[in-house]
Image (cartoon, rainbow, N blue to C red):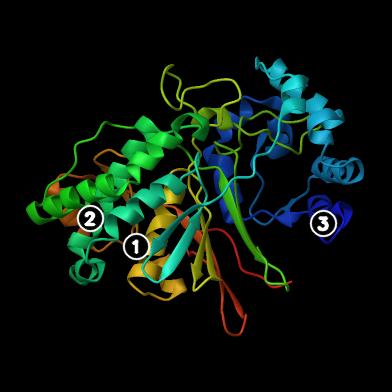
Amino acid sequence: GSRPLTHLVAPAARLAREGFPASPGYVADLLAHRERIERFPQAAEWLLPDGQAPQLGSLITNEALARLLERLAAEGLESLYRGETAAEIVAQVQAGGGVLTLDDLAAYQPRETAPLSLPFGAYTLHASPLPTGGAVLAQVIRTLDGLDLGRLWSEKLPYYHAVALALQSAWADQIALLGDPADTAIALDRLLSDEHTARMRHRIEHLVHTAGVLHGPEIIGLPGGTVHITAADPEGNLAALTLTHGNPFGSGLSLPGGGTLLAGGIGYFERAPGRPNSVGPRKRPLYPVCPTLVMKEAHPLLLLGGTGGRKAASAVTQGLLHFCALRHPVDASLCLPRLHTDGSLTLCVDPGMPRSARDYLRAVGYLLEPGDAGALFALMRDPDSGLLTGVVDPRATGLAVGI
């Protein structure tokens, strides 16, 4: 980077210290998860002052977080793995019955991996690789790319049916066959092979034509505790970052003094042993995040990311279908109705889904649940002028700003 860590951390520390007004989404999340938060006294002390959720618009300050950020800026991020902060993390986890040790943190090494890249019409997509939801995105895109999506979209009902089938198949495959890439990269290669995608494409075409469904196992859904950020600088660099706590408010564990929650990402593993995504030492679980870069003629064009647990990857996939295949403007691509399935016959559908589509999906055999199907955030860069356009899904809590 071109700027010191102290400079980068200062605005966040200042915001934590000076506070921000409690938004409707923040208050609603606290109320929805109040009982769970109350099980963790340190977290409840600062999230639910006086035992109550804050009033809408009240000032939310976090002095403990401000001090932690300033400590990390002064000591360096190494403190997260070997310093005072690392010791605090380990102490909290062990006090809660966990087995994390200082040696575990000290041995941690980030891994720089190549994106999962694939052509899609006039574009090239670079999605986050295993163990993320980019595998689902790639499988759906490769399967649907051989269909006449424009014709299906003009008829609407077959389009939503085809997307539901492709998502259902891809999620069922990921949950059954994929996990840490050290163990399952070969399985992903098979899922993305020409032979497999051709078989799935033929099957989807047949089921759309005959108004049929795939019968998959009922799969436990994952809650969302995710935020997404896209950014660009004057030099033309672009970045997409999706962060997740695993569950809303993470594990519930808080560092001493409050202010910082520890994530609950181990919940993304399967509890049953012997599965590709079962818990194991030094393993990485499947994460449904899916930040994606779209390039055209070797130039960065669009960054897209989403939130909502597994819904995030489904949302990003459909946003790309809208933009790349159906040629909608980027704002419309984010706003159009979407659906989500974890691999079963249960579909979560946006309230904006046309009634005719909902009735049709029920008629062919799906069980529909109302609710949002994830939220999207996009940053588009005009290849000629360099003009940046930020777009926030109306389903999301967020905004686009220039600094």
On screen, residue 150 versus residue 395, left or right, reads left
Q: What element carries label 3?
A: helix
Q: Position of residue 57 (x, y in %)?
A: 67, 57
Q: Residue furthest right?
A: 74
On screen, 141 above or below 222? below
**Amino acid carrying mark 2 in the image:** Ala
On screen, residue 265 versus residue 261, left or right, reads left
Please rate how many residues cluster around mark 1, counting C-alpha atoms within 10 Å: few if below 14, some from 14 to 19, many from 20. some
**Amino acid carrying mark 3 in the image:** Leu
Q: Position of residue 78 (x, y in %)?
A: 83, 37
Q: How far apart are marks 3 and 1 (CA)?
A: 37 Å
- How many marks do you count on the picture? 3
**Amino acid carrying mark 1 in the image:** Pro
Q: Name the residue under label 2.
A: 162
Badge 3 or badge 2: first in the primary sequence: 3
State if disc 2 and disc 3 touch (CB < 8 Å).
Answer: no
State if disc 1 and disc 3 touch (CB < 8 Å).
Answer: no
Please rate how many residues cluster around mark 3, counting C-alpha atoms within 10 Å: few if below 14, some from 14 to 19, many from 20. few
Badge 3 or badge 1: first in the primary sequence: 3
Q: Can residue 163 be seen in this view?
A: yes
Q: Where is residue 232 in the image (x, y as percent from the top left)?
A: 67, 67
Give the numbered dot on residue 337. 1
Q: Residue at coordinates 39% horizontally, 46% vertically from top-left?
A: 136
Q: Where is residue 96 in the image (x, y as percent from the top left)?
A: 67, 18
Q: Distance between the residues labelled 2 and 1?
A: 14 Å
Please rate how many residues cluster around mark 2, counting C-alpha atoms within 10 Å: few if below 14, some from 14 to 19, many from 20. many
Q: Mark 3 points at which residue?
A: 8
Q: Quadrant of the C terminus?
A: bottom right
